Amino acid sequence: MLERIEEIRAEAVAAIDAAGSSAELEGLRVRYLGRKAELTGVLRGIADLPPEERGEVGGVANKARKELEALLERATEAQDAAELDSQLLADRVDVTLPGAPPRPVGHQHLIARTTRQIEDIMIGLGYHVAEGPEVEHDYYNFTALNHPEGHPARMLQDTFYVQSHPDVLLRTHTSPMQIRAMETQPPPIFIVVPGKVYRRDSDATHSPMFHQMEGLAIAEGLTLADLKGTLLAMCQGIFGGERELRLRPHFFPFTEPSIEVDVSCFQCGGSGTLAGGERCNLCKGQGWIEILGAGMVDPNVLGFVEDYGYDAERVQGFAFGLGIERVAMLRHGVPDLRRFFDNDVRMLEQFS
Ligand code: PHE
């Protein structure tokens, strides 16, 4: 009997040593320690042995059982750990692999992008961005901007009026926001106003809807020199650091003096001729490109916002208005403004 126990023990130890998986080890546990195992039978039959054998056989069989239990436990632990390791290795994810295949995403329209670029430049100069309504009152679009009764710009060929409300119209410029902004905050004020404006006009360089960027600065002691310096910084930000400005006298009802501003041509460097000697097509040989209207805010305009803290004796200011399409056309060589609004992706995707 003792020999048989030793045989079983030795066989089980060898089998456990050789086992290659936790499933195999579980099989060995059933086979050597399970209810129907031979060793279990021996232990169960101890009581039937002659009394003088019981002690020794019982002791040896129990020791063998304990040894096998301990051995199995250790082997199972080691096996589980090894299996976990190899599973982790097999499951390893390469986080540096690209995710889902890149999908084409949309991009800003060139007009939106140009608007943002100009906003960024002006924010850098300390300006805030403000927006206002496109459906506007005659008061803000004209009256408070010092348009005398009967001014040609009020006439029907330029302005879209709302039929049922003759004093309501689609704003013809972003300038009404000058008044609205001053009504909401006292001086000093430094704002730019991007937005859509509407005029009854349509050809290669005019569309019934287009975009402007208004600028308004009101503070004590502002002069035309401040206006020129501000516009120079803005134009250099848009068209390049080498650009120069030229101011020409002009007329707007709401600025006095009023100016039109030309920027030196960024294609020919202002010379009017290209490297090959031919005439520059962008500035038509002039060396200058007309870019915006501006001027010192007319004291009459401040009179309309006197009640909001604007005293024309104390504060001065300047304003300017820039056509966004015009900037985008010049910078990207777009020949016809209407292409911006045809929504032809072949055109728009060129500016992604
Ligand atoms: N509002 C003018 C226009 O649309 C431009 C402008 C703005 C001129 C501000 C002077 C000052 O033509």
Image (spheres, rainbow, N blue to C red):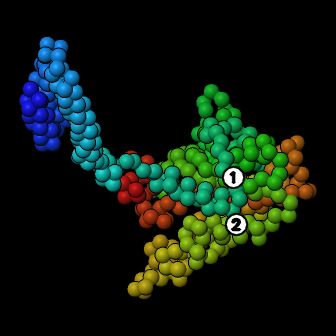
Three-letter code for the amino acid on which mark 2 is drawn = Thr
Q: Position of residue 201 (x, y in %)?
A: 52, 49
Q: Decide which of tag 1 and tag 2 comes sooner along the chain.
A: 1
Seen in the picture, residue 215 relative to 4 is either above or below; the reply is below
Q: Nearer the viewer, mark 1 or mark 2?
A: 1
Q: Position of residue 70 (x, y in %)?
A: 26, 35
> Residue placed at 73% from the left, 49% from the top?
178
Instruction: Work out which residue is located at the far front of the displayed protein and give it.
Output: 52
Q: Which residue is mark 2?
A: 230
Residue nearest the viewer, comparing 32 with 139: 32
Q: Position of residue 247 (x, y in %)?
A: 68, 71
Element at label 1: strand
Q: Which mark is residue 128?
A: 1
Spatial CA span between label 1 and label 2: 14 Å
Seen in the picture, residue 112 relative to 256 is either above or below; the reply is above
> Residue placed at 61% from the left, 40% from the top?
134
Instruction: Work out which residue is located at the far right of the displayed protein and give it.
Output: 313
> Residue placed at 83% from the left, 58% from the top?
219
Quadrant where the N terminus sits is top left
Seen in the picture, residue 146 relative to 333 is either above or below; the reply is above
Q: Which mark is residue 233?
A: none
Asked whether the viewer can see residue 193, the reply is: yes
User: Horizontal placement of 204 versus 82: left or right?
Assistant: right
